[in-house]
Amino acid sequence: MSAAETRIHNALIQNMPAGYHFDTHMHRTVEIFICLSGAITITVLGAPLAVRAGEYLLVFPNVLHSCDIPQDGPCSILQMHFYPESLPQLAYQCSSSESCFIFELALDKRKFFKGRSTPQLAACLEGVRAELANPQDGGRNMLEAYLTLLNILLSRDLYDRAPKSQLYENRHLMRATIHINEHCTEKLTVGGVAEAVGISAGYLTRLFREELNLGVSTYITYVRISKAIDFMFANPNYPLTSLALEMGFCSLQHFSKIFKDKMGVSPKKYFSIRPI
């Protein structure tokens, strides 16, 4: 199995009957699907979101969600799950408008986004599905190309719909968030992050406040919450107190408060839900 194949968990067409229900779950992968026919309701952190034929929905990793098909008819979707770990390297090769999706993954504030599908997006997901279903010579390069194309298509959609600000325009802000994600298990300071991206600590602090409405240290804390979730997926019986301390929190109580603020539920309840 190629490296690209291991980063793509699956790509398939799902045909679901009227009244179908899939209970609350989460996964480490990014999930994207295009509704081909009918309609589907995805409930994300308790908020229902209807997706109809011709629309797509992307759900970010580690987000609680469930699925329901209305009683008035079946639904068909073209669905793909993929791991985001390999994408940050593309941010240094693409323009700002082509890096927005990678930036949102690093930022880790969005839970989902929804849009209208395009022939290019549908062809990309179908190409991945076909390649996985019938592997051929050059498959690894083909899948790498599809991942790159998917990043660009999603980034363009995000960029076109975003209020014009420095959020997607400032490369220093983008690279700072990516640097933090790549080094969050190390000791990080505002000055160290600023130096790594070539700006002053004061300018970095101002960028985070103006564009993200939070401090650099708060963002680092949120990233560590996400890394704690990844760790618990791999080590489901690990003590929460030990996890909290190893991730840089002063106590389990502090970890639990920040976790609930970010994820909407306590860590105990979150980790009691079976990951998919």
Image (cartoon, helix red, strand yellow):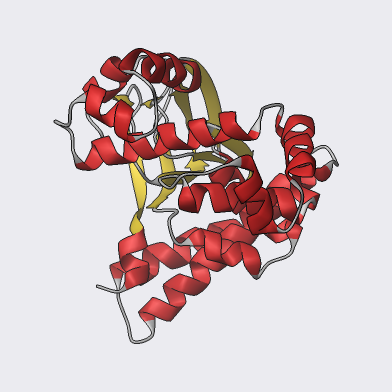
| In this rendering, position of residue 117 left or right of residue 42 | right
Relative to the observer, which residue lies in front, 195 or 92?
A: 195
Relative to the observer, which residue lies in front, 13 or 210?
A: 210
The quarter holding residue 45 reads top left
Residue 196, above or below 24: below
- The residue furthest right is 164
Picture residue at 34% right of the left edge, 18% below the top: 251
Picture residue at 35% right of the left edge, 14% below the top: 266
Look at the image and tell me whether residue 71 can be seen: no
Look at the image and tell me whether residue 212 can be seen: yes
Residue 133, above or below 256: below
Relative to the observer, which residue lies in front, 74 or 145?
A: 145
Q: Residue 32: x percent and y percent?
A: 48, 45
| In this rendering, position of residue 48 left or right of residue 161 | left
Q: Residue 207: x percent and y percent?
A: 77, 39
Q: Residue 125: x percent and y percent?
A: 48, 59
- The residue furthest left is 237
Q: Residue 253: x percent and y percent?
A: 35, 12
